[in-house]
Image: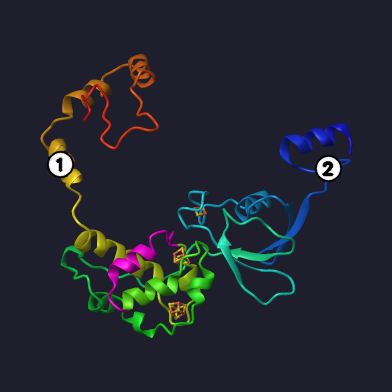
Amino acid sequence: MSAVAQQSKEQTGASYEGSVRTDLVPIFIMGKKYDVPSTLTIQKAFEYAGYQLIRGCGCRGGICGACATVYRLPGSAKINVGLACQTVVQPNMYLTMIPFFPANRAVYDIDELKPDAQTILKYYPELAKCMGCNTCTKSCPMEIPVMEYISAALRGDIEQAAEISMSCVMCGICAARCPAELGQYNIGIMCRRITGKHINPRAEHLREMIERINSGRYEDPLNKLVNSDLQTLRKLYVEREMEPHTAPEDWAPTDKAFL
Ligand code: SF4
Ligand code: SF4
Ligand code: FES
């Protein structure tokens, strides 16, 4: 390897022999072959191949669930799934992104819902069609036991359904694979909303904070900040009192102007 190629490899991770990259692997995006660097995620491989992602691309960090992807590998009939921003390409993977999958989404007034199985079944009657095949669990890129939260919702254990489904990013892959045509993620979020509204205790500190805001307590200090010049804001920011790493739970800054 030339000195230039070696330097480039060290700086970018790319491999060159002469002027030809040697770290490329073939992948098939919607049936068309592209050679892409082997270290790229599927999302970056799309862009390397020339696609501009205006759908199916949000946080790029495995949080928003916008980049659901399905792929097959050579010699296997298995349909693999993953988030494009989190899954690294493999040689000869055959893939496409499914940035949206339509699922039943109920409209309801959260104030009027009761935390029981009848409520969930009223808005999502297809829940009763679940046949316990576990395909949803096996297809979830977040490794959520999807069938378990669906079962919990079906037996009216709303709180458990909320707890199990908490890390759902709503990518829709489970819904795409479900033979009973459930939209699991919308059922999960309904359970989380009902739990937050009707089961969990009210957050007392939040009520107190809202009262303080409504009383106008922060108007003056906020206006003072809004009307400060850049230099003053920088000084305030640099000199602000930081919370120590090992502070007790009731730690508070000495200056309580914004508390
Ligand atoms: S994929 Fe559908 S039918 Fe199968 S367990 Fe999950 S929710 Fe039930
Ligand atoms: S539960 Fe379904 S929608 Fe949620 S992350 Fe898993 S596969 Fe995606
Ligand atoms: S872009 Fe948000 S999860 Fe992939």
Q: Can you give x and y, in whole percent of width and height, for residue 57 in the image?
A: 51, 53
Colour convention: rainbow
Q: What stretch is highlighted in magenta?
A: 155-170
Q: Can you give x and y, in whole percent of width and height, for residue 135 in the image?
A: 51, 77
Q: In this view, does 163 lie above or below 57?
A: below
Residue located at (32% from left, 74% from top)? 153
Left or right side of 234 for 198? left
Left or right side of 208 for 60? right
Q: What residue type is labelled 1?
A: Glu
Q: Which amino acid does label 2 sit on?
A: Tyr
**Is residue 157 magenta-colored?**
yes
| Quadrant assignment, res 17 | top right
Q: Which image quarter has ligand 1?
A: bottom left
Left or right side of 139 for 129? left
Q: Can you give x and y, in whole percent of width and height, for residue 225 in the image?
A: 26, 22
Nearer-N-terminus badge (2/1):
2
Residue to which mark 1 is pinned: 208
Say which mark, if any, is on residue 118: none
Q: Residues within 10 Å of mark 1 (few under 14, many from 20)?
A: few
| Quadrant assignment, res 215 | top left
Residue located at (48% from left, 73% from top)? 136
Is disc 2 placed on a helix, strand or loop?
strand
Residue to which mark 2 is pinned: 16
Is disc 1 placed on a helix, strand or loop?
helix
Residue located at (39% from left, 65% from top)? 164
